[in-house]
């Protein structure tokens, strides 16, 4: 056994150096005079051809770099084939080999089916989802839309303590008057370090806390007990007007689930298409007498 392994290693070494010599030659990717493709290396009954190496070498690569790439690939290929041959020799048990063959067949079938379903769905799926359809799905399935986090509608701004008209800002950020809203917006664009004025958009409360240094051990109670929040540190004033909120574990609003519902509806359509495809294929095979159940 030891002598056989030594012989094998010696043989592989010879093959490797032969391949190296071929790769380093001037006729790097040429066919032989008879026009037949050259063999770069052989391990048992497996052959590595020039064509496999050609695809690995980018156009314009120097001879030296091409040789390095080819050498590395040849070495890895030889090692892999040797190990695979060794592993295959251990599969002498028919039961084990049949088990592996079955797994490979199942995997192949799964890949074929997946590729077909993907192509079939891409051709047949209607991706248009109306707002009415989204609304209907939301209203019918509200129990399925539970908030995992606290969310808020809010306006806030962060301004330097040295900024002008701070007293006016304290009035404007609390006001719903159109004129005050406009004045606050103009002020923010001129002086605010950071601000958010879209009071119709839901935000995560945790995202607000990242911007405003709010300190609380009970976020739900904080939201229930605070509408206007003013905080200051050594450099900035922070002003927050909480326009609305929803506590986690309550029903998530439609606007927050809009894109999620679109994905749900499209996934349901995909399942229906696949079911219809399966039924059509089955019915066609029955009609053509391509299915036969043989009972003992």
Image (cartoon, rainbow, N blue to C red):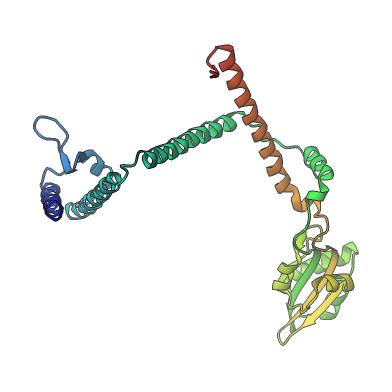
Q: Residue at x 78, y 38 (%)?
A: 133
Task: Looking at the picture, tell me which residue is in the foreground, 24 or 1.
Answer: 1
Relative to 51, 131 lies left or right: right
Image-quadrant location for residue 64: bottom left
Q: Position of residue 236 (x, y in %)?
A: 73, 82
Q: Residue furthest bottom?
A: 234
Is residue 124 visible in the rendered structure shown here?
A: yes
Q: Residue at x 82, y 50 (%)?
A: 143
Q: Position of residue 167 (x, y in %)?
A: 85, 80
Q: Residue at x 81, y 38 (%)?
A: 132
Q: Height in image: 109 above or below 181?
A: above
Q: Residue furthest top?
A: 288
Q: Residue at x 18, y 52 (%)?
A: 67
Task: Looking at the picture, tell me which residue is in the foreground, 152 or 147.
Answer: 147
Task: Looking at the picture, tell me which residue is in the foreground, 182 or 158.
Answer: 158
Task: Looking at the picture, tell me which residue is in the foreground, 100 or 285.
Answer: 100
Q: Position of residue 91 (x, y in %)?
A: 32, 44
Q: Height in image: 153 above or below 215?
A: above
Image-quadrant location for residue 34: top left
Relative to 76, 6 lies left or right: left
Is residue 193 visible in the rendered structure shown here?
A: no
Image-quadrant location for residue 235: bottom right
Q: Position of residue 85 (x, y in %)?
A: 26, 45
């Amino acid at each position: 056994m030891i002598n056989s392994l030594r012989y094998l290693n010696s043989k592989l070494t010879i093959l490797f150096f032969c391949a190296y010599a071929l790769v380093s030659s001037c006729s790097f990717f040429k066919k032989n005079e008879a026009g037949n493709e050259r063999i770069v290396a052989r391990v048992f009954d497996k052959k590595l051809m020039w064509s496999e190496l050609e695809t690995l070498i980018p156009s314009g690569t120097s001879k030296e770099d091409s040789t390095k790439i080819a050498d590395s690939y040849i070495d890895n290929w030889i090692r892999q084939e040797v190990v695979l041959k060794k592993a295959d020799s251990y599969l002498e048990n028919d039961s084990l080999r049949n088990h592996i063959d079955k797994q490979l067949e199942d995997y192949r079938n799964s890949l074929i089916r997946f590729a077909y379903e993907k192509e079939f769905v891409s051709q047949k799926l209607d991706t248009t989802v109306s707002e009415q359809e989204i609304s209907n799905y939301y209203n019918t399935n509200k129990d399925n839309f539970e908030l995992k986090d606290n969310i808020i509608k809010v306006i806030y701004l962060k301004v330097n303590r040295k900024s002008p008209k701070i007293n006016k800002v304290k009035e404007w950020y609390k006001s719903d008057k159109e004129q005050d809203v406009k004045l606050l917006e103009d002020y923010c664009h001129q002086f605010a370090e950071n601000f958010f004025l879209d009071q119709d958009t839901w935000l995560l409360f945790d995202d607000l806390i990242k911007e405003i240094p709010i300190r609380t051990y009970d976020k739900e109670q904080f939201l229930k007990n605070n509408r206007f929040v003013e905080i200051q540190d050594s450099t900035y004033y922070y002003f927050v007007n909480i326009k609305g909120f929803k506590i986690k574990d309550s029903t998530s609003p439609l606007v927050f689930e809009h894109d999620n519902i679109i994905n749900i509806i499209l996934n349901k359509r995909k399942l229906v298409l696949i079911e219809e495809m399966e039924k059509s294929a089955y019915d066609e095979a029955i009609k053509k007498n391509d299915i036969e159940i043989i009972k003992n």
